[in-house]
Image: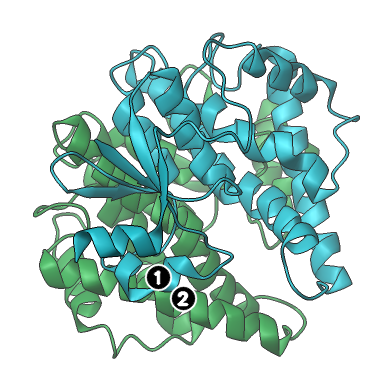
Chain colours: A green, B cyan
Amino acid sequence: MLTLFGDLESGNVHKVQLLLHRLEVPYRRVDVSQSRGDTRRPEFLSLNPIGKVPALMLDDGDVISESGAILYLFGAPTALWPAGDRARAEVLRWMFFEQYSHEPALAVLRYLRRFAGRPAAPDRLQELAAAAARALRAMETQLRAQPWIARDCPTLADYALYPYTRWADEAEVDLAPYPAVTRWLEAFESLPRFLPLRTDGAVRAISLAAYAAERA
Amino acid sequence: MLTLFGDLESGNVHKVQLLLHRLEVPYRRVDVSQSRGDTRRPEFLSLNPIGKVPALMLDDGDVISESGAILYLFGAPTALWPAGDRARAEVLRWMFFEQYSHEPALAVLRYLRRFAGRPAAPDRLQELAAAAARALRAMETQLRAQPWIARDCPTLADYALYPYTRWADEAEVDLAPYPAVTRWLEAFESLPRFLPLRTDGAVRAISLAAYAAERA
């Protein structure tokens, strides 16, 4: 069975859970948390030298990481990865936008406001809020012109963008100025086999310590 | 003819120049600079709502952006995009790593040390230097095990990672602790039709003002 490394507070991990659940692919989960420091432990770095979650161990023991790469690996044989290089490039465009411009604003703001032990510098918060507004304006422009972010039907890019957009409230970012984004979030939640945030789609979950003991 | 929007100081733009030059695809370039503020002007946002360079206008007037998506669009029909979903996911893994973990450390450090008008906060520089070291350690681990970042032959992931790794000196990051990375940089520079940093591969370059006048 597949083993997914990651926790329920990571939107990047939730993207993978959303897709595996949608595709009815069974997996177990090892609870690895970045904010707890697990991702920098040697036992995790030996599995994924990049030191980030999600990482996914395949049935042959090989490990793949980066949420976008995992979405591709499982989504490529489905309609969520459309036909044609131009359409596929558009899906990747919004997946890269998410990792480069959207997540570093919305997810980092959420982290600083919800999980960081000490208060963040005001100018850092202001800079991140401005970047979050730019990312949401780009989504709003796109979603006023078409129902889904990359195409007229759902693609892997929608799966990539859902978690941290829905968690805007925890980043203290108001979505009221972005009605097309709000409509899109609701449409996403109506897709088949939708999995809400912080819901575990795994068959079972174990700790990193229990996993290490099992491998020893 | 294709129109590439971007400047010679952007490593993200240089990735696209590297690939188009390698593939002998002719294009002209409109000089759009993020540090000059061009990417937030309405005339640029109407072309690319994401507000980043590179952006590329295709022959039909359609615009694609995000360096990774453009690399895919032109690289997909070549050997730089290998066969098989698992191999392709590995290429995407390192392309997402670059945009999510590598560029935000190395390119931002370079920006703060070379282009920013005012001195950066010391704890911000320290945090970025630590992130750069983590990214380079991940590359070093990978490049000790194999000659190219995603496979045993060059792929789009090597094109994505080259510019900001080579510019480590401008970020004041010493590559001496990473001999496999240094060897890989030299191997990359020996590939056919390599285009050095800050070299323009465009047939001609015009200003954004001249481009706007042409379109009016």
Q: Is residue B71 left or right of residue A4?
A: left
Q: Which amino acid is tagged 2?
A: Ala
Q: Label 2: which residue?
A: A132
Q: Is residue B98 visible?
A: yes
Dot 2 lies on which element? helix
Chain for numbered disc 2: A
> In front: B155, or B210?
B210
Dividing the picture into quadrants, the one containing residue A175 is bottom left
Q: Label 1: which residue?
A: A135
Tell me the quarter of the image containing the C terminus of chain A.
Answer: top right
Do discs 2 and 1 share a chain? Answer: yes
Q: Which amino acid is tagged 1?
A: Ala
Dot 1 lies on which element? helix
Tell me the quarter of the image containing the N terminus of chain A.
Answer: top left
Q: Residue at x 51, y 35 (%)?
A: B15
**Residue B56, position as x, y percentages in the image:** 32, 45
Q: Is residue B205 left or right of residue B101?
A: left
Query: Relative to A5, is A58 above or below?
Result: above
> In front: A43, or B189?
B189
> In front: B90, or B17?
B17
Q: Are marks 2 and 1 in contact (CB under 8 Å)?
A: yes
